[in-house]
Amino acid sequence: MNYCTACNINLGTVEIENNKCPKCATTIRTITNTKLINILTELNETMYKVSKGITKNPKDIIELAKIIQKGEKKLANEYKKKMELMQDLDYELSVITKFAQQMNYNIEE
């Protein structure tokens, strides 16, 4: 899944040239985490339905609100997991860098 955070648009699986958004030329990385893709897709579709006023039925509107609320919780959970992973990776990178400096390695390319 390709998602442009600058334009707030889901580019889906559209082929993009040079990893750039076709609209604003922001660099995009492909999201491969299926759990995150499912959350984003569900929220995107729900927000589209809400913004276009597809339904006027109060029960449907309440259901859409529940989907958004659950999606927010799932996103917060994913965010927390990814932040923990980033902290682990940051620590590992600092260890690698420190070790490389001690050994006089040039690891940056």
Image: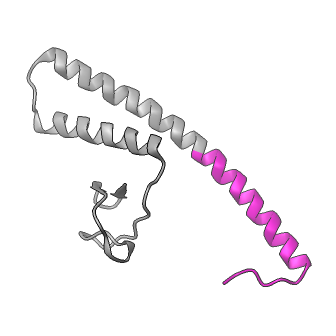
Question: What residue is at 33 percent from the left and 61 percent from the top?
Answer: 6
Where is residue 14? Give x, y as percent.
27, 62
Between residue 60 and residue 30, name the one nearer to us. Answer: 30
Q: How many marks?
A: 0
Which of the colour schemes (rainbow, by chain, secondary structure, one colour) is used? one colour
Q: Based on the displayed image, in which of its 4 quarters is residue 102 positioned? A: bottom right
At a point 27% along the width and 25% down the height, the residue shown is 65
The residue depicted at 31 percent of the width and 38 percent of the height is 43
Q: Identify the image quadrant of residue 5.
A: bottom left
Instruction: From the viewer's side, name the closer residue of 7 and 30.
Output: 30
Residue farthest to the top? 59
Eyeballing the image, is 55 above or below 90?
A: above
Q: Name the residue rendered at 19%, 22% in the picture.
A: 61
Which residue reaches farthest right?
Answer: 102
Asked whether 68 falls inside the magenta stretch, the response is: no
- Vertical arrangement, residue 21 with respect to residue 82, above or below: below
Q: Is residue 59 left or right of residue 12?
A: left
Quarter occupied by the N terminus: bottom left
Say whether residue 106 is left or right of residue 36.
right
Quarter that holds the C terminus: bottom right
Could you tell me what secondary structure mostly forms the magenta stretch?
helix
Question: In screen coordinates, is 50 left or right of 68?
Answer: left
71 is higher (above) or lower (below) than 30: above
Left-right relation of 99 to 54: right
Residue range in magenta is 82-109
Image coordinates for residue 7, horizontal then vertical, percent: 28, 60
